[in-house]
Amino acid sequence: MDAAAPQEITDPKIAAAVAAAEAAGPGPGESVRIDSWIWAVRLIKTRSLGATACRGGHVRVNGERVKPAYNVRVGDEVRLRHEGRERVVVVKRLIRKRVGAPVAVQCYVDNSPPPPPREAVAPAGIRDRGAGRPTKRDRRELERLRALRGLSGMGGSGTGGSGRR
């Protein structure tokens, strides 16, 4: 698989970056931890978030929950639940260091389901410029819309007070 991958790359900058990533990758007989790999291919922002996801059971390799120190191999199927979305990727190349996004996508095959469509509804809380301060009725409608969308970060009684008496 690795021998055919560089011929697919047409951009010389990406080809050079892939070659650098392969040079920095593990040597023969060495392995890469799953938390390090999902961070290196940019599926997760930080390695510590990757380790936390593994410990929380959000990372599965070949259908089994894995610990952060699990050694990933070429051909493994990695399932990652992150930010309300499930990513399903097959490992094509092992890398240890974080690389740029064009190089990172060369390291796996993405079999993820498409992300859910964004709502076509206008966001709640947007008012026309110059419309003035919202009336009590407007405020209640906004709170009702936020509660319906799950964006209500209030959690209090809804009186609008500071909570002191």
Image (spheres, rainbow, N blue to C red):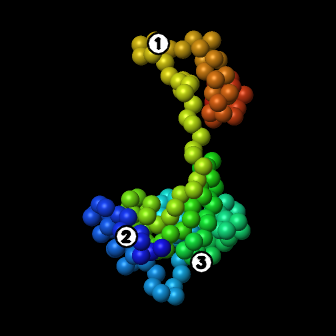
Residue 14 has which mark? none
Pointer 1 residue:
132
- Asked if 111 appears above or below 69 in the picture, the reply is above
For badge 2, the amino acid type reads Pro
Q: Secondary structure at mark 3?
A: strand
Q: CA distance from mark 1 to mark 3?
A: 59 Å
Please name the residue shown 62% across and 53% down the image. Answer: 86
Label 1: few (<14), some or many (≥20) within 10 Å? Answer: few
- Asked if 85 appears above or below 42 in the picture, the reply is above
Q: CA distance from mark 1 to mark 2?
A: 60 Å
> How many numbered circles are shown?
3
For badge 1, the amino acid type reads Gly
Residue 48 makes an appearance in the image: no
Residue 6 has which mark? 2
Label 3: few (<14), some or many (≥20) within 10 Å? Answer: some
Pointer 3 residue:
71
Quarter of the figure with residue 77: bottom right
